[in-house]
Image (cartoon, helix red, strand yellow):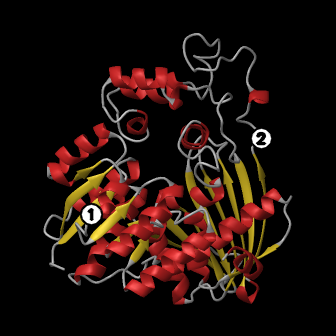
Amino acid sequence: MENKLKIAVIGLGSRGNSYAESAALLPDDCEIVACADILPDRVKRFGDKYGVAEDMRFSSGEELLEHEKLADVAFICTMDRLHYGHAMAALNRGYHLLLEKPVSPVLSECIEIADLAAKKGLEVIVCHVLRYTNFYRKLKELIDSGIIGDIVCIEAYERVVYWHQAHSFVRGNWSNAERSSPMILQKCCHDMDILYWLVGKKSVAVSSFGSLSHFKASEAPEGATERCDEGCPHYHTCPYSVDKNYLEWGRRGVFTWPIDVVSQVPTMEALEEALRTGPYGRCVYHCDNDVVDHQVVNVLFEDGITANFNMCPFTAEGGRKIVVMGTKGDFEGFVDDSKIIFSPFIDRFSDHSVTYMTEGVEDNFGHGGGDYAIVRDLIALLTGKYDVGYSLTRVGDSIESHVIALAAEESRLAGGKLVRSEDYIKENS
């Protein structure tokens, strides 16, 4: 392998483009030489943007992977249920992988990918990008320093925010578990991985409650139409109106995420046409979604450590919050504030709290810098040019987050029954 990595990107949607943009920031270390997607216009735009040769542009991941190895590493950014096939084929061709999460909605497939990577001596880094943010890296460093003593419990939540739920999990690609994966896995294996990483111990048992309570036909306002357009009497008042959530941004000249998911062509004409004819123009109460719109997960880790996580989109603003409680103090922080507050158990009548700020240049990139940092760390790992960050999420390590999320979904579907992690692994390996 040459010192300058050659990259093939499979799946040219939002995630594939984000990682490609991050790789483009390191032109001395890597270059994008091949790409694939089932949508020809995506292939053309991506290929033109990154200077990919015409004969290295493919109409699917399968077509690209039929060829002998074309690059050193493949970025696999396709839909959840395609990951297994693409990953196995790429590993058999000799590619290292940057693999979008979740690895697979099927635990046995996750394990097969990890086993094949180990057999081939290849790296598979899973895109748990939260680990790579300055916020969580600092929090992990502080926990490992021992200043809060031993961790006893963690409380965490994600405010998915109302419009993101409507975009991604009602109208969008991850609205239906059979086509994609359960929401607690797709959206929050990030968070399950963070809990596992911070605690440093494996799960013992999981329980969970949640449901789809709002985004369904029975909750539709009277007279709501199948399409979200001027024909609906609620078009100008509904918080999920495409006018407010997509067209207004277009009129302002903003065509970044999530607008670029609706239409990758950054014009009002293209956006309006996509909303007239495509899935993102549907009424949120008349879609084929079946994933939850709120869920809580309780986890028992080794040594009696407990954690609870709450995922809910019924919030005006998005973001994650976490409280880590130890035997000598606690940490509290909102990820979007880039701030961690340490409160030691010293004196009830005095404030001895310390605030750690975690801003950095990486915060200019996606997921608080995580998208860029994971690409940088992968390049560091494969080229040896830089020090590798301690956040690396190899696929074998990533499996624990999938066990927690999938066990949580089994528990939820069974009304909150306790699912022991060991039993879940045995039954689903």
Between 200 and 144, the residue placed more toward the observer is 200
- The quarter of the displayed image where residue 285 is located: top right
Mark identifier at residue 67: 1
In this picture, is 125 found above or below 265?
below
Task: Identify which residue is drawn at 39% across, 48% down.
Answer: 14
Q: Nearer the viewer, mark 1 or mark 2?
A: 1
Query: Picture coordinates of residue 127 (x, y %)?
Result: 44, 66
Between 205 and 312, the residue placed more toward the observer is 205
In this picture, is 249 found above or below 16?
above
* Left or right position of 69 against 300: left
Query: Which residue position is annotated with label 2?
Result: 213
Between 96 and 169, the residue placed more toward the observer is 96
How packed mark 1 is, by other alpha carbons closer than 10 Å (few <14, some 14-19, many 20 or more), is few
- The quarter of the displayed image where residue 427 is located: bottom right
Query: Picture coordinates of residue 261 (x, y %)?
Result: 42, 39
Q: Secondary structure at mark 2?
A: loop
* Residue kind at label 1, given as amino acid type: His
- The quarter of the displayed image where residue 99 is located: bottom left
Please indicate, yes or no, whether residue 155 appears anywhere in the rendered image.
no
Query: Picture coordinates of residue 133 (x, y %)?
Result: 42, 67
CA distance for labels 1 and 2: 47 Å
Pointer 1 or 2: first along the chain: 1
Task: Identify which residue is drawn at 30% across, 39% down.
Answer: 40
Mark 1 in CB contact with mark 2 (< 8 angstroms): no
